[in-house]
Image (cartoon, rainbow, N blue to C red):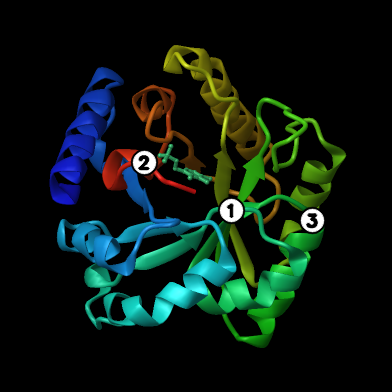
Amino acid sequence: MIAENIARVREQIAAAARRAGRDPQDILLMAVSKTVSPEAIREAYAAGVRLFGENRVQEFQAKSSALANLSSTGLKDHAARWHMIGHLQSNKAAKAVELFSAVDSVDSLRLAERLNAAAQSMRKKIPILIEINIGEEAAKNGLSPDDGELEELLQAATGLENLSIGGLMTVPPFTENPEQARPFFRRLREVRDSINARNLPGIAMRTLSMGMSHDFPVAIEEGSTCVRIGTAIFGGRKI
Ligand SMILES: *Cc1c(COP(=O)(O)O)cnc(C)c1O
């Protein structure tokens, strides 16, 4: 089941890339494994998935020992990588740096500073993405594109020596029709491009993490470089 789902998602990624005149290799598939059992995660790994997203530190900590051998294989392209994609409280920053290979949901300057300090004390460099609340929804995490705090974070980048800011991530407003998400995806790409055009020290963003099960083909047409797929791979979540 899971292997078939992954094959279907990969076909849809390739088809969307072709429509947009893009190379399917430029789009990473992240399997979002929150609430999913280690057994199901192993099936996805066996089907070739190497990048996984989790949204809670405690949940992943509990699962991680059962999955350790997927991450610790010596062969580079064989090791599973785990990214934090959910809201992270600053007081869990150190734990997150210990457990995850990247944090894709940095939504405040304070969190960036805490992650940097934790990475420094563990002598690591941590890749991060800045989460943008592209629909400016009150209930969503992420910095608004016009937020002074986004500007502060960009200006602080050179001082955050143990972070490497790779790009932007977003969860757009939910719409039944994925076409309605298109302007939000396009806007995220424009935000990234306009930040890059400023040639700020320490800032060269490539990644656009956008697109989930119901809207990833549209996100790819608008430039996504990483799609985060949960339901379409593992089935519906109960919680
Ligand atoms: C749960 C989640 C996803 C995956 O959502 P699906 O609709 O199940 O594909 C992607 N991104 C984030 C940040 C999530 O929390």
Q: Secondary structure at mark 1?
A: loop
Q: Any mark on residue 236, and which?
A: 2
Q: Amino acid type of disc 2? A: Gly
- Amino acid under disc 3: Leu
Location of residue 124 in the rendering, given as x and y in whole percent from the top left corner: 57, 80
Determine the residue positioned at 28% across, 81% down. Answer: 69
- Inter-mark Cα distance, 3 to 1: 16 Å
Q: Nearer the viewer, residue 19 or 99?
A: 99
Discs 3/1, front: 1
What residue lies at 70% left-to-right and 43% top-to-bottom? 141
Give the Cα separation between the discs numbered 2 and 1. 18 Å
Against 222, residue 125 (above or below) is: below
Mark 1 near ligand 1 (CB under 8 Å)? yes
Q: Give, as a three-letter code, the residue at label 1.
A: Gly
The residue identified by callout 3 is 109
- Give the residue displayed 58% in from the left and 58% down from the top: 128
